[in-house]
């Protein structure tokens, strides 16, 4: 269980990092730092990173919540049997 919790935490952080990258790319687009020839690719990857990052973070956050609930139930059952 601990290994799965650690893995999901790393995935959650990766998802948050993708959202951060999308935000940074969007800021570069707004400030005009990106040449016109690369603007289309930047918009595409900005949207892709944002969607993937939010999706990964949401799924992993939900899994971590469920793991936490299961651990709490297990602890309560262990306390009840003592």
Image: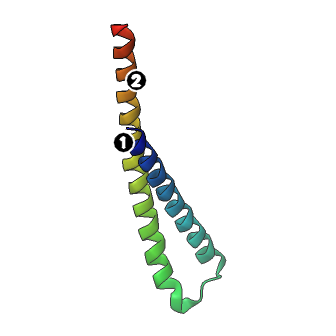
- Rendered image coloring scheme: rainbow
Mark 2 crowd level (few <14, some 14–19, many ≥20, 10 Å Cα): few
- Say if mark 2 contacts mark 1, CB within 8 Å: no
Towards the viewer: 74 or 46: 74
Pinpoint residue 31: horizontal percent, then vertical percent.
66, 76
Query: Which residue appears at 59% of the width and 77% of the height?
Result: 29
Q: Nearer the viewer, mark 2 or mark 1?
A: 2
In the rendered structure, find residue 63 and report the number of the disc placed on it: 1
Query: Which residue appears at 47% of the width and 57% of the height?
Result: 15
Q: How far, Cα to Cα, is label 2 from label 1?
A: 14 Å
Query: Which residue appears at 52% of the width and 88% of the height?
Result: 38
For the C terminus, the image quarter is top left
Towards the viewer: 60 or 47: 60
Pinpoint residue 10: horizontal percent, then vertical percent.
48, 52
Q: Hey, which quadrant is residue 68 in on the image? A: top left
Q: Earlier in the sequence, mark 2 or mark 1?
A: 1
Query: Which residue appears at 40% of the width and 48% of the height?
Result: 60
Q: Hey, which quadrant is residue 54 in on the image? A: bottom left
The relative height of residue 14 versus residue 61 in the rendered view (above or below) is below
- View extreme (bottom): residue: 37
For the N terminus, the image quarter is top left
Pinpoint residue 67: horizontal percent, then vertical percent.
37, 35
Mark 1 crowd level (few <14, some 14–19, many ≥20, 10 Å Cα): some
Total marks shown come to 2
Q: Hey, which quadrant is residue 55 in on the image? A: bottom left
Towards the viewer: 55 or 80: 80
Element on which disc 1 rests = helix
Pinpoint residue 36: horizontal percent, then vertical percent.
55, 90
- Residue for badge 2: 72
The relative height of residue 73 versus residue 46 in the rendered view (above or below) is above
Towards the viewer: 73 or 24: 73
Element on which disc 2 rests = helix
């Amino acid at each position: 269980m601990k290994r799965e919790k650690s893995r999901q935490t790393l995935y959650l952080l990766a998802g948050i990092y993708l959202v951060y990258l999308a935000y940074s790319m969007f800021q570069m687009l707004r400030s005009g730092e990106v040449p016109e020839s690369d603007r289309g690719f930047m918009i595409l990857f900005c949207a892709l990173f944002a969607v993937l990052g939010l999706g990964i973070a949401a799924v992993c956050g939900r899994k971590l919540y469920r793991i936490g609930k299961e651990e709490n139930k297990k602890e309560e059952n262990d306390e009840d049997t003592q």
